[in-house]
Image: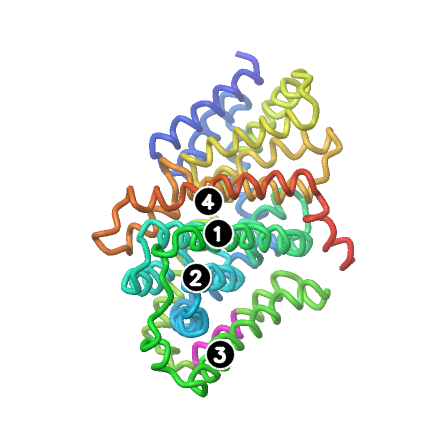
Amino acid sequence: MSPEYLAMLMLGIMIVFIMLGGHVALALGGIAVIFGYLGWGSGIVSMFPDRIFSTCTNFSLEAVTLFILMGSILEKSGIAERLYSAFHVLMGPLRGGLLFGTILLAILFAACTGISGAAVVAMGLIALPSMLNAGYEKTVVSGVICAGGGLGVIIPPSIMLIVYGPTAGLSVAHLFIASILPGLLLGGLYTLYVGVLCSFKPKIAPPLPKSEREKITLRGRINLVLTSVLPILGLIFAVLGSIIFGLASPTEAAAVGAIGSLVICGAYGQLTWENLKTICLFTLKTSAFIMLIVVCAGLFTSVFLGLNGGNLIEKWLIGLQFGKFGIMMILMGAIFFLGMFMDWLGLLLIFLPIVVPIITEMGINQLWFAILFCITLQMSYVTPPFSYSVFYLKGVAPENVTLFDIYRGVMPYIPLQILGFFLIYIFPEIVLWLPRVLE
């Protein structure tokens, strides 16, 4: 069998294995070893230590651990509860005010954790019961939490962007800057949709009763803002501002964020030994899981590209004569479909080294493509059957909120994400303007 056909068989077996629920790292590493041996013999064994060493010495990937640490500390600090209390008071008088507050909280939490799952779980525990008690419709509430929490994969400091950078040979700092406006665009579309929905159906999200609003005085509201909103805004500015203005690399900024989150956690009286133990164990497990997949995915793509699989796919796509738009839609359609069944990390690490040479050959701007790629992966977070945001929320939701309720709630946000995708496709300056201004 020729190397090219070995590569295609390798890719097909990997996709089937993962879609059937196989362990991502074991699938990637095991299949790579088997097909590498078929292609080159025992020389494949020496590639393992090389991949492990290159991953462990990658300075950009160190930011992954630090941002996970930062998000874990903030989760234990109780900042999400304080922020929601502030938005509850400030926006409760508006029709649908708690929905607006939830979207804003999702954006702030995304800008502090970089992980969508953390935002969905936090808001599911804090915001979901509060809005249900206020008389909000459960499908609407579920949709806002899942869609808003999913912004964590596109708003910096996104872990997805940190992994994307070194995999595609792009600056993580440039990716962070380029993703700011697209992230705010999606958040704005969600907010606009909620506003229109509440205008036509006021009963689904009633304002808080006057008696509830008057429980907290003006002084209490000011105190809530000073003790919850300002610290988190200061932390976001310290992390992203240091990157945007060239004062620190993403890894250095992540260290600043971790220290800042420790200060906030200590100020709130949550810096206990028990919490520190939980924080460190979570950071260790999550970072080890990500790095294991990075190593195995790197081995898989090295074998696949070494067997000329990338060249075969490139020739096939270019030979279709569909032009840039057609090939882009084929690539994004494939990523969207596979994202419904596969975890984003494995999908990104497997397919990015394959598609980057193709878009480079076609003259497509890599920064623009990166944001479109990540938005497409974000869609898979809320797209059945394997929508991770839905599963995260169901895991913490009350029993009366069914899986069907959550699916009904998230469905309107899929067209909004597609709209955001095409707006960015039609107007590339949404991505490219800010990096160019700040160069």
Relative to 32, is 4 above or below?
Answer: above
Q: Which mark is residue 225?
A: 3
Residue 167 spot, x, y in % from top left: 61, 43
Q: Mark 3 to mark 1: distance in Å?
A: 27 Å
| Residue 265 lies in the magenta-colored region | yes
2 or 3: tag closer to the N-terminus: 2
- Disc 4 marks which amino acid? Tyr
In terms of sequence position, does the residue under pointer 3 or pointer 4 come before the other?
3
Residue type at the position of mark 3: Val
Give the mark, 2 or 1, whose residue is nearer the N terminus. Answer: 2
- Total labels: the figure holds 4
The residue stretch that appears in magenta: 258-267
Q: Are marks 4 and 1 in contact (CB under 8 Å)?
A: no
Crowding near pointer 3: few (<14 within 10 Å), some, many (20+)? some
Q: What residue does disc 1 label?
A: 196
Q: Is residue 250 visible?
A: yes
For the point 51% across and 39% down, the residue is: 48
Residue 102, label in figure: 2
User: Can you identify the residue that label 4 sits on?
Assistant: 413
Q: Nearer the viewer, residue 303 or 171?
A: 171
Type of the residue with mark 1: Val
Q: Quick one: label 3 or label 1, which is nearer the N terminus?
A: 1
Q: Position of residue 213 (x, y in %)?
A: 37, 76
Q: Classify 31 as above or below 85.
A: above
What's the colour scheme?
rainbow
Residue 73 seen in this snapshot: no
Residue type indicated by callout 2:
Thr
* Label 2 close to label 1 by CB (< 8 Å): no
